[in-house]
Image (cartoon, helix red, strand yellow):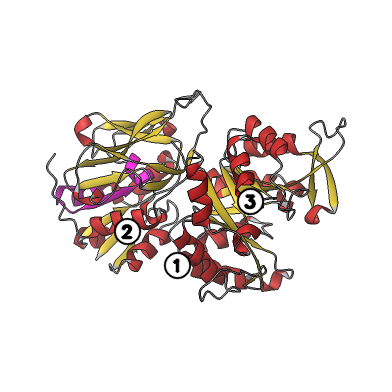
Amino acid sequence: MLSKRIIPCLDVRDGKTTKGIKFKGNVDVGDPVEMARFYYEQGADEIVFYDITASSDRRDIMIDVVHRVAEEIFIPFSVGGGMRTLEDMRRVLLAGAEKVSVNTAAVQNPGIIADGAQAFGSQCIVLGMDVKKVEQSETIPSGYEMVIHGGRTYMGIDALAWAKEAENLGAGEICLNSIDADGSQKGYEIALTSLICENVNIPVIASGGAGNIDHLHDVLTKSKADAALVASIVHYGTYTIRQIKDELHTRGVKVRMRW
Amino acid sequence: MIAIIDYKAGNLKSVERALKELGFPCRITQRTDEILNSERIVFPGVGAAGKAMADLRQLGLDKALKAAFEANKPILGICLGAQIILERSEENAAQCLGIIQGEVKLFPRPLLSAQKERLKIPHMGWNGVHLRKKHPVVKGITPSDEFYFVHAYYPRPSSDKCVIGTTDHGIVFPSVIGHRNLIAMQFHPEKSGAAGLRILKNFCTWDGRHAE
């Protein structure tokens, strides 16, 4: 039986991580490579990097980070942020990432999912979804709408319909981020996560809102998410990955306990 | 020197990096002479069986691999490389290498867990391996070790003798298979943390012998 995955997420700008870390030890908290190694040794099942570098001519810095991460950790990792073309995807995959995550570009041009799946295989293509709760309507029957630009721009696309379409186009996994819950530390959006999990056949990573272990437990059991993304609660040292896994294991959630 | 066979099927660098981390010299190659002169061979692969077989044949590597097997070189198949060593695959109805008798099957649908929950295909993520037999390459692996899988098809050798370990994903399928100097695993040891590195290290020091 598959284990539920615990996946730390690192935001990287100009080759440096953007969130401080308060854990003990002599890790350079600004260095994504050292942080990846740290989480790898702590038992992370996978690592997600988001490149939030604003200017596209500084993207080469991220490729260098990916190369160096691939030499340090022997678990899968994905890279997202600014993936607009097949060439963008090819560069991070060749640099050593297992998967690429497409978000805004896919909403604007769904064909990139099919092209990416065709070129590199569905297992490489993660659809990143940023979602906000809205009034149910004819265009948004699920009451969850796709947003971009960190939630500032509404796309008029129903999140459930989009998840199904992306699966048909060849996405191999969904990373589902609730903009409402993101950063709140008040728990994952269980209703949204359940809705997507029940209606697609590809794995779903729940994202946004983790503040304590109850939140992780709930999203992995009540909503059947295959994996949970964690950011602040591990970056700020509230819990280590090992503490999260020990606790989930004690509560009967199957997680990988030996590494 | 360990030869990592390059037939355009996926990310070979991760295997190379893992072997280098362990301190074993290796080279990614398409050349038959390098493969036949190597000490041992890693046969990785991601992608579809039909295209992989076509590329292997076009590069003449199907023959090189069979010759290396006959020459008793230790060979490690990974993922797709653990599938196309069988005789045929349901994926693209591909005729495969036939080093081990048997076929490659698609997971049945619907796929349900013991608790009658719907399971997803591909089988993606971390799962355990139940060892049925001892083998030098899986020495030191315990029931609580887990490995990273990502696949929709699985190998099914004709003979149970070739099944070294199994994994449960709705059905119990062979996840580690072996025959003589060939050992193959459906998961990615190069992406499976310390447990995976241990398997790679075992392989790199294996003499290719194994009592079946």
Q: Which residue is mark 1?
A: A72
Q: Report the Cα–Cα distance between label 3 and label 2.
A: 44 Å
Magenta stretch encompasses residue A13: no
Separation of residues labelled 2 and 1 (CA atoms): 20 Å
Q: Amino acid at mark 3?
A: Asn
Type of amino acid at the residue the image marks with label 1: Glu
Measured as percent of width and height from the top left, residue A56 is found at 71, 69
Q: Indicate whether A132 appears above or below B166.
A: below
Of tags 3 and 2, the one toward the viewer is: 3
Q: In the picture, which quadrant includes the N terminus of chain A?
A: top left
Could you say which is closer to the camera, residue B54 or residue B102? B102
Question: How far apart in space, not on screen, are marks 1 and 3 (Cα)?
Answer: 29 Å
- Name the subunit of mark 2: B
At numbered mark 1, what does the secondary structure look like: helix, strand or loop? helix
Q: Quadrant of residue A85?
A: bottom right
> Of discs 2 and 1, which sits in the foreground?
1
Q: How many marks?
A: 3
Query: Compared to B8, does A114 lie above or below?
Result: above
From the viewer's side, name the closer residue of A219 and B94.
A219
